[in-house]
Image (cartoon, helix red, strand yellow):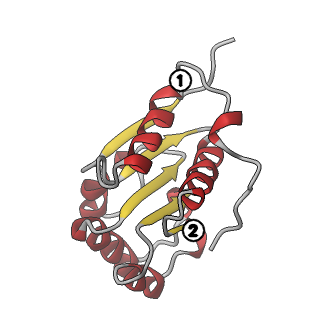
């Protein structure tokens, strides 16, 4: 699990035209699990704040949630998440996930089963991830939103 920054909440997230849609999507899936599944957020900045804010909001509603760093995602972990108590699985920086065909297959299957709400962040769009076509396709089943930098 990835440590959560309790100070990163929706209320202190700097909202602008380039990230308002991502914020709205996350608030929607907090209210209605599986409304968009998975939610895939990509861009240069703000993603980790949004994932922390989502976890903090879900925990305040007593919902079962886990936040993972993609570097620490393993085959065994993903396999166990399917039958876990967690309703919400947040994965930060998917672009840093270890290159492993079995892991990719497990993650694709987790999306297919569609019993858990997945919220995933990355620096690149799903089509640009260096993963197999099956996982790329599954990541595009839900909502994809790009966080753009604020224009100054």
Q: Is residue 50 something one can see in this rendering?
A: yes
Q: Position of residue 133 (x, y in %)?
A: 26, 60
Question: Which element carries disc 1, helix, strand or loop?
Answer: loop
Q: Position of residue 58 (x, y in %)?
A: 53, 57
At a point 22% along the width and 67% down the height, the residue shown is: 112
Instruction: Report if the CB atoms under discs 2 and 1 are less than 8 Å apart.
Output: no
Picture layout, residue 138 above or below residue 99:
above
At a point 62% along the width and 39% down the height, the residue shown is: 10
Q: Bin the neighbour count of mark 2 within 10 Å (Cα to Cα): few under 14, some 14-19, many 20 and up.
A: many
At a point 55% along the width and 27% down the height, the residue shown is: 148
Which of the 4 quarters of the picture holds residue 93?
bottom right
Q: Quadrant of the N terminus?
A: bottom right
Q: Bin the neighbour count of mark 1 within 10 Å (Cα to Cα): few under 14, some 14-19, many 20 and up.
A: some
Q: Position of residue 116 (x, y in %)?
A: 34, 67
Between the C-alphas of marks 2 and 1, the distance is: 25 Å
Answer left or right for 84 relative to 98: left
Q: Which mark is residue 4?
A: none
Sequence-earlier tag: 2 or 1 = 1
State the residue lying farthest toward the right: 7
Q: Quadrant of the C terminus?
A: top right
**Residue that carries the numbered disc 1 in the rendered image:** 18
Q: Which mark is residue 68?
A: 2
Which of the 4 quarters of the picture holds residue 79?
bottom left
Answer left or right for 116 relative to 6: left
Picture layout, residue 31 above or below residue 78:
above
């Amino acid at each position: 699990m990835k440590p959560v920054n309790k100070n990163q909440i929706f209320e202190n997230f700097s909202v602008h035209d380039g990230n308002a849609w991502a914020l709205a999507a996350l608030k929607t899936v907090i209210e209605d699990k599986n409304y968009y599944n998975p939610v895939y957020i990509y861009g240069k900045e703000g993603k980790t704040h949004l994932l922390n804010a989502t976890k903090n909001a879900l925990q305040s509603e007593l919902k079962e949630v886990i936040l993972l760093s993609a570097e620490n995602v393993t085959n065994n972990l993903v396999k166990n998440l399917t039958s876990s108590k967690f309703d919400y699985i947040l994965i930060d920086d998917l672009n840093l996930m270890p290159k492993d065909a079995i892991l990719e297959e497990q993650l694709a299957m987790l999306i297919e089963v569609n019993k858990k709400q997945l919220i995933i962040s990355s620096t690149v769009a799903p089509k640009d991830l260096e993963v197999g076509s099956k996982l790329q396709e599954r990541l595009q089943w839900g909502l994809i939103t790009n966080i753009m930098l604020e224009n100054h």
